[in-house]
Amino acid sequence: MNDSTAHAHHRRTMSKFLKLAHKFNSFYLNGLQKKECRAFIVDGIQVGLVRATVTIELSRYPNVFIVNPNSVTLNPAFRDYDERSANIESVLKEMKEKKLFITLKGWRDECYEVRTMFADQPLLKMDRSATCLFGICNYGVDINGYVNHPQKGLCIWLQQRSLTKQTWPGKWDNMVAGGLSVGNSVIHTAYKEGEEEASLTPDLMKNLQSAGTVSFFYESERGLFPDTEFVFDLELPPDFVPRNQDNEVEKFELVTASETVNRILSPDFKTTSCPVIIDFLIRHGIINPENEPRFPELVELLHVPLQSLYKKCDNLLTENGLSKAE
């Protein structure tokens, strides 16, 4: 069997879930190997990756970005968090005015921290709409709201996103999900998003259970999305109905486990929210080694090693005889 035949056979034997995992890990499995992006370096540390189309625009700002064959470095003259943040923001706002990148249409005036690993001190902050231009690792919080229904068994609350949302309008999504913005802890974000998106009261949230993280590396026309989601499970009373307060949700629906499977496999579900649901279905035994022949691969693709990814890239740059600023 030659390579192309083997590859075709591999694709044919792939389960629907594994195909979906390949979709939300499109950059991790395909883009990363192509080595077409430059390392984004801040204070001597790699914090992201920059695609060629973005590099061209950044090269127009030589006082802010130093562009080399293998890297884009934020000017080391900017010594601290505030100075770095301000200089990047001025460039991004100018690029937004010029309508250069579709993602900047969704400018939020809400910032994410930029750091290599979650435990590291942040080096700067950046508007959340722009982080995908630099392949910055983002963090979010998701709550799986579920009910052990007396007749229907395990049921899961899903939301349909508002038709006016900048990203994935009208797509189905997890009951509650939100990004980890500057100044907010993981648990604070869970409570804040729970209240805003689904009217989850502190009394209901007492049952909130931490369920680890999922991580994946997606690519779309908007940019690069290395993403880690802090996952929580929340068992809800059968008579509870979520109500949205921030006008970001069209409606909620309580669906059975089997209908949830159909929903995530349809094009109507937000691709980058599928990992959280698949993880939930695995932990509750709905997806298991008996019905998923590629089970170990699927589980691995829910936990892509993003915390060490840029460190590995960093070492590679050094090993190849390039300084980190080159």
Image (spheres, helix red, strand yellow):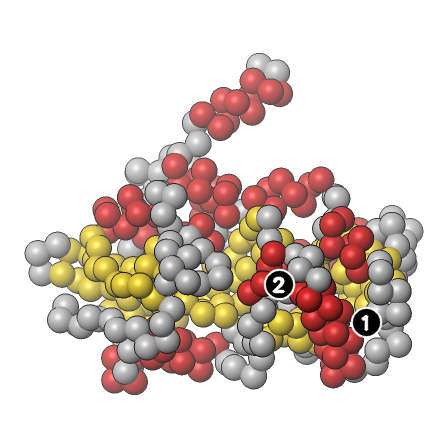
* Residue 109 against residue 103 in the figure, above or below: below
For the residue pair 89 and 217, the one nearer the viewer reads as 89
Residue at x 84%, y 69% (from the top left corner): 64
Mark 2 surroundings within 10 Å by alpha-carbon count, few (fewer than 14), some (14 through 19), many (20 or more): many
The tag earlier along the polypeptide, 1 or 2, is: 1
Note whether residue 308 is visible: no
Q: Amino acid at mark 1?
A: Asp
In the rendering, at what x and y percent does residue 29 appear?
59, 42
Q: How many marks?
A: 2
User: Looking at the figure, which quarter contains the N terminus?
Assistant: top right
On the rendered structure, is 199 left or right of 110?
left
Q: Residues within 10 Å of mark 1 (few under 14, many from 20)?
A: some
Residue 104: mark: 2
Mark 1 or mark 2, which is nearer to you? 2
In the picture as drawn, the residue positioned furthest to the left comes out as: 151
Snapshot quadrant of residue 100: bottom right
Gap between marks 1 and 2 measured at Cα? 25 Å
Above or below, comparing residue 234 to residue 286 in the picture: below
The answer to whether residue 177 is above or below residue 5 is below
- Secondary structure type for disc 1: loop
Q: Are marks 1 and 2 in contact (CB under 8 Å)?
A: no
Is residue 58 visible in the rendered image? The answer is: yes
Near-viewer residue (286 or 70): 70
Judged from the image, the secondary structure of the residue bearing numbered disc 2 is helix
Please, what is the three-letter code of the amino acid marked with disc 2? Leu
Residue 40, image x, y percentages: 76, 60
Badge number at residue 43? 1
Q: Residue drawn at (60%, 48%), measured in percent from left and top? A: 221
